[in-house]
Image (spheres, helix red, strand yellow):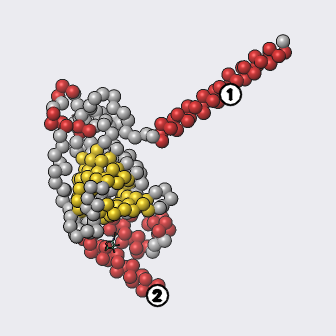
Amino acid sequence: MACTTGARSTQRYYSAVILPKFLLVAVVAIIGITMVIAADPDPLQGFCVGDLTSNITVNGLVCKNPAQVTPSDFIYTGLEKPLAFSKFYRNSVNTAFVMAFPGINTQGISMARLDYLPQGLNVPHWHPRASEILFVVNGPLEVGFVDENNFLWANTLQTGDITIFPRGLVHFQYNNGSTNALAIAALSSQNPGRQNSGNSVFGTDIPNIILEKTFNLSPEVVVELKKFFKSQAQGKGINEEATSEDRSKNLNRLFLSLLTEAL
Ligand SMILES: *[C@@H]1O[C@H](CO)[C@@H](O)[C@H](O)[C@H]1NC(C)=O
Ligand SMILES: *[C@@H]1O[C@H](CO)[C@@H](O)[C@H](O)[C@H]1NC(C)=O
């Protein structure tokens, strides 16, 4: 009898403690895996052309009424040409993200066209919501990304090569050649987002003292860096203001004078 009772209580113990614990571990593991592989949500219908006029906020854009969708909703002609080149960085970043091309809404994908004059630079930046695969139409092009251990994975890409910039990691491209370069990027989100290394710290209202301590810089240099990055379009790194070149020269002079003082 005692044995049966023991077995029963053991069974109860398993069902009351072990099983829920096991289930909890399984559920946590499944949630964990889901979070690790999370990208844009899967579509729940064939297409969902974004309605840019709707005021309803959802995770993405509300679908345009399918009866009003036309073939032209699935064309975007904005990538035919580069946008205006940044005078300072000598590059152009032209994106076909969902707000420009609502036809990609819910599809978890987007594109960009990247043009570089000689010495053209797409500054170090990252996309919080997308990995990026880049095809070089006209090379060569210097590229690189930095992993979580701050190791740089750099390459010289030739025409026809492709590379990958993993989601959320800092990456850049630079045209070290003597002719224009062109690359086409595909990104794994309809709305990848972009943060630049410089703008996301010096282009913000982070208190100067925090930046002085973080980067081991003098107050004057932080003021100059803030002026330089705050003069740029927020989060874009494309500087159309001619003054920025002067600011950079000022900054070089400032560094030199500080160096001279130090010596
Ligand atoms: C969206 O909001 C604006 C301003 O609040 C309003 O004028 C407009 O009528 C709204 N549009 C729709 C489709 O509800
Ligand atoms: C650019 O090319 C020059 C000459 O080949 C080379 O010395 C330099 O390291 C290159 N710079 C980059 C960033 O690849």
Quick check: can you spot residue 148?
A: yes
**Apparent side of residue 90 relative to residue 252 in the rendered image (left or right):** left
Q: Percent x, y for residue 122? A: 30, 61
Q: Along the horizontal axis of the image, is 84 left or right of 257?
A: left
Which residue is more in the foreground, 263 or 224?
A: 263
Discs 1, 2 touching: Cβ within 8 Å: no
Q: Can residue 193 be seen in this view?
A: no
Three-letter residue code for mark 1 = Ile
Q: Quadrant of residue 105?
A: top left
Picture quarter containing residue 38? top left
Q: Name the residue under label 1.
A: 18
For residue 73, above or below residue 113: above
Q: What element carries label 2?
A: loop
Q: Which amino acid does label 2 sit on?
A: Leu
For the point 26% across and 59% down, which residue is it? 159
Q: Where is the N terminus found, in terms of image quarters?
A: top right
* Mark positioned earlier in the residue sequence (1 or 2): 1
**Residue drawn 25% across the image and 43% down it:** 99
State the separation of the CA atoms marked 1 and 2: 69 Å
Q: How crowded is mark 1: few (under 14 residues within 10 Å), some or many (20 or more)?
A: few
Tag 1 secondary structure: helix
Q: Whole-percent x and y of residue 4?
A: 80, 14
Mark carried by residue 151:
none
The residue that mark 2 highlights is 263
